[in-house]
Image (cartoon, rainbow, N blue to C red):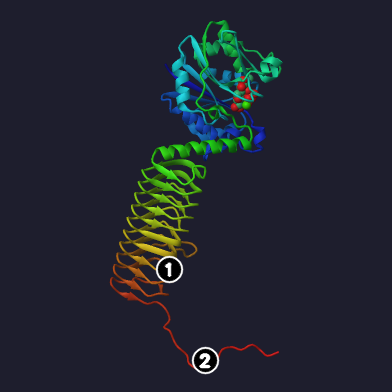
Amino acid sequence: MKIDVVILAAGQGTRMCSSKPKVLHSIGGKAMLRHVVEAAEALGDVAVHIVVGHGSEQVEAELGSKCNYIVQSEQLGTAHAALQALPLLSEGSKTLILYGDVPLIKTDTLKAMIDSIDDNSMAVLTVEMKDPTGYGRLLRSANGSVEAIVEQKDARSEQLAITEVNTGIMCIPQQLLEQWLRRINNDNAQQEYYLPDVIQMAVKDDVVIHTPQPKSHYEVQGVNNRAQQAELERVYQGWQAERLMEAGASLADPARIDVRGELTVGQDVFIDVNAVFSGRVILGNRVKIGANCVISDTEISDDTEIFSHCVVHDSIIAKACSVGPFARLRPGTRLDEKAKVGNYVEIKNSHLGEGSKASHLSYIGDTEIGIASNIGAGTITCNYDGVNKFKTVMGDNVFIGSNSTLVAPLEIEDGSFVAAGSTITKTVPSENLAVGRGRQKNISGWEKPTKPRS
Ligand code: UD1
Ligand code: CA
């Protein structure tokens, strides 16, 4: 049977105090709504329909054309929101209703709901809450069968004591949903069209109502303010940490790692405290990440160690390299096997060949370096004339003496040697020594300046 997913996301989210629609605020670096869409998409062949209201253009711009959007211009209640999506549902589909501000829902939970229903049954996901204030309560008969959901504002005092609540997440056959939504009125305390009113209709129509529960109550926790967002952020990060440890990574402290994207790890990886990963990061076997590293969109191969306090973006680092502490690898950095980048070295759009080293205090930009070359401390590639960028090309076994200034465009050929403190502006031929500095002159009998006597 086809699956239609309707995500309600029209609410303004006033309590976020933001110019951005609430559902675009992120958890783990990803919009909450995107989490929900991805959980739904992982079910397989689904059509996703998003009911948008406030900031609909922003929502569409973020999620793109793979989802359908329906604008609910006035927020008259959850049933009214679902009603807007009706024309887009396929006849006879199973319709799953989700919420854009309930980001941690898991695909397994949804799958179990979908699998549990047929043409004459529906499922509503419920949860036990110690403090059920604000939620719709599940009313059950003496024999335990579900009778209705009553909203907080409509509930009698003995009903308020009920701790089983409606999560709002439901799975309903399209043909039943259609009939029921058309019959729901707003005759209640909030004068809203309540989606949970479908429960009474299901009871009346002898439709079986399943009430599964999620594994974790965080799956169904909504976000209405930044404190709740922060709480779910920590839950999400905890889940990421568990996943990484299950995959073979050791974490110095599972509570002090942040994954804001997709982190893939090999076996026996070690990640020290306060590492932040974003975008797509892949760590090979036995990779070690030191404390306080920020790494995004980077691939790091087996046995490489990134020492503490490094910032690495859009780079590819081969096996058995050593980076940092305090190194910055900017986009387009490629390190071949056993390359070494030491402290206070900045590299941008450059390639270090196998075994090449820049161990201290350098800027290397737009540079190609061959095998087993050594870049001395304080070397700067001058790649920019204020308007244009130029390349520096170094061969194999090149040695650049400390504090050299390499003015690009420039070629330094295999086996050549640049004397310390040189400013190099033209090609250094293979196996040559280049000296590009004033000669030392020693002046005898020189008198030091003296302070005037007062
Ligand atoms: C709803 C349920 C309640 C349940 C709770 C779980 C109703 C009437 N009540 O209450 O039983 O316990 O969720 O969190 O459904 N939305 C729209 N358009 C609207 C109204 C709401 O898109 O016209 C969206 C909101 O953006 C939000 C979601 O639907 O994402 C829930 O709406 P909200 O007003 O927060 O419902 P609750 O009062 O929390
Ligand atoms: Ca709510």
**As drawn, 173 above or below 227:** above
Question: In the structure shown, which secondary structural element does the residue marked by tag 2 occupy?
Answer: loop
Residue at the spot 31% in from the left edge and 64% down from the top edge? 395
| Snapshot quadrant of residue 401 | bottom left
Residue 113 drawn at (x, y percent): 48, 19
**As drawn, 344 above or below 116:** below
Per the image, the residue denoted by label 1 is 377
Q: Where is the C terminus found, in terms of image quarters?
A: bottom right
Decide if residue 378 is on the left or right side of residue 223.
left
Q: Nearer the viewer, residue 290 or 68?
A: 290
Question: In the structure shown, which secondary structural element does the residue marked by tag 1 occupy?
Answer: loop
Disc 1 and disc 2 in contact, CB within 8 angstroms: no
**As drawn, 56 above or below 378:** above
Per the image, the residue denoted by label 2 is 446
Q: Amino acid at mark 1?
A: Ala
Residue 267 drawn at (x, y percent): 36, 43
Residue at the spot 52% in from the left edge and 42% down from the top edge? 255
Residue 117 drawn at (x, y percent): 46, 14
